[in-house]
């Protein structure tokens, strides 16, 4: 059985890739991922806020006491005194590369403020490459709240971020984004044309909640369910064969049937997160064995044979991924 696939130009043993999560914070956990059959690993995300904090602390250390003592003008603290997240992240990449043979994909969570992005983390992408990362996942998490900001400017910011990062690195860059665009198909096409080596569909925005006891707004993280895969399934099926870049499916992939559906839609890889948090990284091995069993039973010889077989491009009824299917589903629904 040939389970190999290609993602971001990297030849992978299987399409099963753990996505960015706290599970990759420990080197031993990344080793267990490899032992369980992971074909690559996306490291936990480094947030833009951490990089901005680093620059603020660096400025503080360099300026503190400057005007108290003349000799302070030439004093610079040693880097090891900072103990900041970004520096540790680079060390973690290097340690992971030494510990395992599978590709290591770094992840930067890029935020934007008032419609503009800071440039510090774009330059940090080069350091990620120098640390040994095989690829970079650019996770753009942006909820525009400025009512005077037109949609075109919001979209342009994504392209500016991508181009800035691509100018700093030679390793492949994937963009992880949400589906919330007026015309997502056009957005995907333009990102591919702007140099994205892959698209990761989709980012799950973690919505805030209100605590009725403390009367405070609090973060609320809910692990995904298989229902979450419907949106990426539809868009990967629509985009398959129409873009030059790779397509990664994420959100709601818990079992082998979920993997099979995403592959048939046209995904190059399927990314696993919530299911590994629930069941442990050893669950990768179970998913792979069930994947192989289904393929053998249905006489498939390779992932390549599966890939895109039920995409919109190859589906006997292309409208199944559009409004016609919506009307059909509603008309056939019967109340309990």
Image: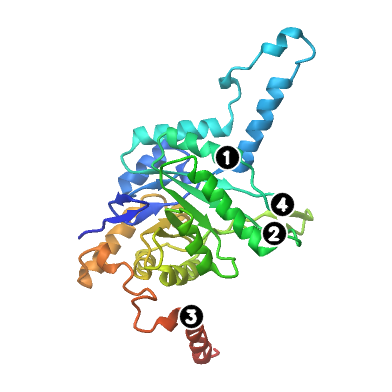
Q: Is residue 22 at all visible to an observer of this figure? A: no
Q: Position of residue 322 (x, y in %)?
A: 48, 80
Which residue, given by chain and number where applicable, does mark 4 sit on?
114
As helix, strand or loop, the secondary structure at mark 1 comes to: helix
Q: Which of the two discs, 2 and 4, labels the residue nearer the N terminus?
A: 4
Q: CA distance from mark 3 to mark 4?
A: 34 Å
Q: CA distance from mark 2 to mark 1?
A: 29 Å
Q: Quadrant of the C terminus?
A: bottom right
Which residue, given by chain and number where applicable, does mark 1 sit on?
121
Mark 1: few/some/many CA within 10 Å (<14, 14-19, 20+): many
Q: Tell me: residue 86, above or below residue 294.
A: above
Which residue, given by chain and number where applicable, does mark 2 sit on?
209
Q: Which of the two discs, 2 and 3, labels the residue nearer the N terminus?
A: 2
Q: Which of the two discs, 4 and 1, labels the residue nearer the N terminus?
A: 4
Residue at figure coordinates x 64%, y 58% from the top left: 154
Q: CA distance from mark 2 to mark 4?
A: 23 Å
Foreground: disc 2 or disc 1: 1
Residue 96, by quadrant, is: top left
Left or right position of 308 against 49: left
Foreground: disc 3 or disc 4: 4
Q: Is residue 135 at all visible to an observer of this figure? A: yes
Q: Which of the two discs, 1 and 3, labels the residue nearer the N terminus?
A: 1
In-front residue for pair 73/228: 73
Picture colour scheme: rainbow
Mark 4: few/some/many CA within 10 Å (<14, 14-19, 20+): few
Q: Which of the two discs, 3 and 4, labels the residue nearer the N terminus?
A: 4
Mark 3: few/some/many CA within 10 Å (<14, 14-19, 20+): few
Which residue, given by chain and number where applicable, does mark 3 sit on?
322
As helix, strand or loop, the secondary structure at mark 4 comes to: loop
Q: CA distance from mark 4 to mark 1?
A: 17 Å
Q: CA distance from mark 2 to mark 3?
A: 32 Å
Q: Position of residue 334 (x, y in %)?
A: 52, 91
């Amino acid at each position: 059985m040939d389970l190999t696939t290609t993602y971001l130009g990297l030849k992978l043993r299987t399409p099963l890739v753990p996505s960015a999560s706290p599970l990759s914070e420990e080197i031993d956990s990344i080793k267990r991922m490899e032992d369980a059959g992971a074909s690559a690993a996306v490291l936990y995300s480094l947030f833009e806020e951490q990089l901005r904090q680093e620059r603020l602390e660096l400025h503080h250390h360099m300026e503190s006491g400057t005007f108290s003592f003349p000799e302070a003008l030439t004093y610079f603290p040693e880097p090891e005194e900072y103990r900041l997240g970004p520096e540790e992240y680079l060390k973690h990449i290097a340690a992971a590369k030494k510990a395992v043979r599978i590709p290591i994909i770094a992840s930067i969570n890029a935020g934007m403020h008032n419609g503009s992005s800071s440039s510090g983390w774009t330059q940090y992408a080069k350091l990620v490459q120098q640390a040994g990362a095989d690829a970079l996942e650019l996770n753009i998490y942006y909820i525009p709240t400025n009512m005077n900001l037109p949609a075109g400017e919001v979209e342009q910011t994504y392209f500016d971020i991508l181009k800035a990062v691509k100018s700093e690195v030679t390793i492949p860059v994937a963009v992880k984004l949400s589906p919330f665009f007026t015309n997502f198909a056009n957005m995907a096409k333009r990102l591919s044309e702007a140099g994205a080596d892959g698209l990761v569909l989709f980012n799950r925005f973690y919505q805030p909640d209100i605590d009725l006891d403390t009367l405070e707004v609090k973060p609320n993280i809910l692990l995904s369910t298989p229902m979450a895969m419907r949106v990426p399934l539809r868009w990967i099926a629509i985009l398959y064969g129409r873009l030059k870049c790779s397509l990664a499916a994420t959100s709601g992939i818990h079992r082998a049937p979920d993997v099979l559906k995403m592959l048939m839609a046209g995904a190059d890889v399927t990314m696993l997160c919530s299911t590994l948090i629930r069941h442990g990284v050893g669950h990768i091995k179970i998913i792979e064995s069930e994947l192989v069993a289904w393929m053998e039973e249905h006489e498939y010889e390779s992932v390549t044979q599966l890939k895109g077989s039920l995409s919109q491009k190859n589906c006997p009824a292309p409208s199944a991924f559009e409004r016609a299917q919506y009307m059909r589903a509603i008309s056939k629904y019967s109340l309990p």
